[in-house]
Amino acid sequence: MYILVTNDDGIQSPGLLALRQALDTVAETVVVAPERNWSAASSARTLFDPLRVDPVTMADGREGFVCSGTPGDCVALALLGVLERKPDLVVSGINIGVNLGNDVSYSGTVAAAREGTTMGVPAIAVSLDGRKDADFKPAAAFAARLAKIAVEHKLTPQVVLNVNVPRSEIRGVVVTHLGRRTYRDELIVRHDPRGRPYYWLGGGEPEGDLTEGTDTAAVANGYISVTPVHFDLTNHHWLDALRGWQLDV
Amino acid sequence: MYILVTNDDGIQSPGLLALRQALDTVAETVVVAPERNWSAASSARTLFDPLRVDPVTMADGREGFVCSGTPGDCVALALLGVLERKPDLVVSGINIGVNLGNDVSYSGTVAAAREGTTMGVPAIAVSLDGRKDADFKPAAAFAARLAKIAVEHKLTPQVVLNVNVPRSEIRGVVVTHLGRRTYRDELIVRHDPRGRPYYWLGGGEPEGDLTEGTDTAAVANGYISVTPVHFDLTNHHWLDALRGWQLDV
């Protein structure tokens, strides 16, 4: 098994290192990761600038590649020819912080995995409910186990497996659907030394839906959540309603 | 009716101007648009930098606001307090180039609309199969008509209406589901004056699915396509399959 490992927190992230080290126990791995933090990059891609990919030595002395683009760019470059052969799996993470419910659309971690599936390679995204100094080992060990199981079960690129790991002791693993995250964004206005306003998008942690069966509830209750996500965005329920509107020109 | 108008091609785009002018005939409008082109920005949001919003005079002498952030940032800032009152609708576009099928996930135009719905405001995204020198008037006129119909029918923020307008004579309007776009991305390697490689993500126009009922087929056949898209990404078909895997730790 040959696995492309990437993330959206950047090549220096301890989450990436822990993930790579755990995946090394079940597969041959290669790292292509962004040079900086791209949290909330979503599926952004670079169209108007050239990109660099350079060899880099990671904190444990192993080699990797650092890329000047977005998480999506990293995977696209890797799969379009920077790697000499096609990997069996893309694993993205371990993100510092959860990617639950609505977060999935904003997440660069999930977007990197998703780029794998768009190009025909099955993919897993892994996020941890913790900060930079968290213990990534339990999440990394689960990711390695899941990678092995996924390849054995011939996971297809129809879905990304979106994994979130709780910060506390792990009570088990559940398959979930996405819950709702209610954002509490607020506008913070400040003034520069010349008196002109500038803005921060701030606000508290989003609140998670605690409905049974959701990813938000699972992680809140101490379970690892695994959600199959896809990117077919048609809302089929709305087709008939819209057909009742007089739209013709 | 009060409409927030935005786009992802930037404040200078002729598509934005045409859209605003057409919407002016059915509503009060306000423009908050990015200062530069953010094509393929997806739902990217700015977390680590402050943002500016400044008044600007558009090409027709009307006032607007230009924002230093992504398309999603523009809408978030507007709705969180830069606008004094909440709009009834967000309309994003007119994008220079289609946003069909898989494009929807990468599109900054759709992401801006989507940000409206996340914050409780119904939204429409409009894209034209044409270039910068295209005639935006037919697409703009349809957008204005649809905005009016949508508000009359009490469009909810459960969906974004994703509209694509063909470049040739318009044969009618159809409600569609997203088709498949097959990308033909390729890696282009060049060398800088110091001999070091750099990369462009290039490739031809994606191919569109011509299956009846898809947005890709509709636009190829000369119809305006209206697709209800949502962002509930769970793949429900996969839940049972995954529950059959031995995932527990």
Image: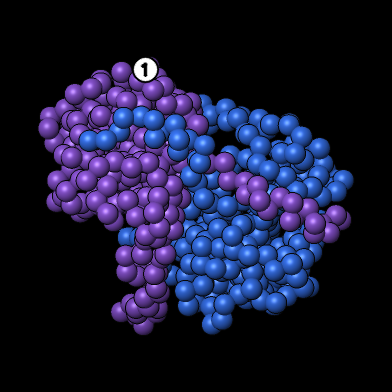
Chain colours: A blue, B purple
Give me the residue at 35% from left, 20% from top.
B152
Q: For this view, does A30 lie left or right of residue A34? A: right
Q: For this view, does B48 lie left or right of residue B41? A: right
Location of the N terminus of chain A by quadrant is bottom right
**Numbered disc 1: secondary structure:** loop
In the rendered view, tell whether residue A171 sits above or below residue A33: above
As drawn, the residue found furthest toward the left would be B60
Count of picture labels? 1
Query: To which quarter of the image does residue A213 belong?
Result: top right
Residue B74 appears in the figure: no
Residue A138 appears in the figure: yes
In the rendered view, tell whether residue B97 sits above or below residue B204: above
Q: Which residue is mark 1?
A: B84
Rendered location of residue B183, percent (x, y): 41, 65
Viewer-side residue, B39 vs A34: B39
Location of the C terminus of chain A by quadrant is top left
In the rendered view, tell whether residue B237 sits above or below residue B137: below
The three-letter code of the residue at mark 1 reads Glu
Give me the residue at 64% from left, 69% from top.
A89
In the rendered view, tell whether residue A216 sits above or below residue B184: above
Rendered location of residue A70, percent (x, y): 48, 58
Viewer-side residue, A209 vs B148: B148
Give me the residue at 65% from left, 59% from top.
A124
Give the chain letter at badge 1: B
Give me the residue at 47% from left, 63% from top.
A73
Query: To which quarter of the image does residue B83 belong?
Result: top left
Rendered location of residue A145, percent (x, y): 79, 64
Rendered location of residue B228, percent (x, y): 43, 39
Bin the neighbour count of mark 1 within 10 Å (Cα to Cα): few under 14, some 14-19, many 20 and up: few
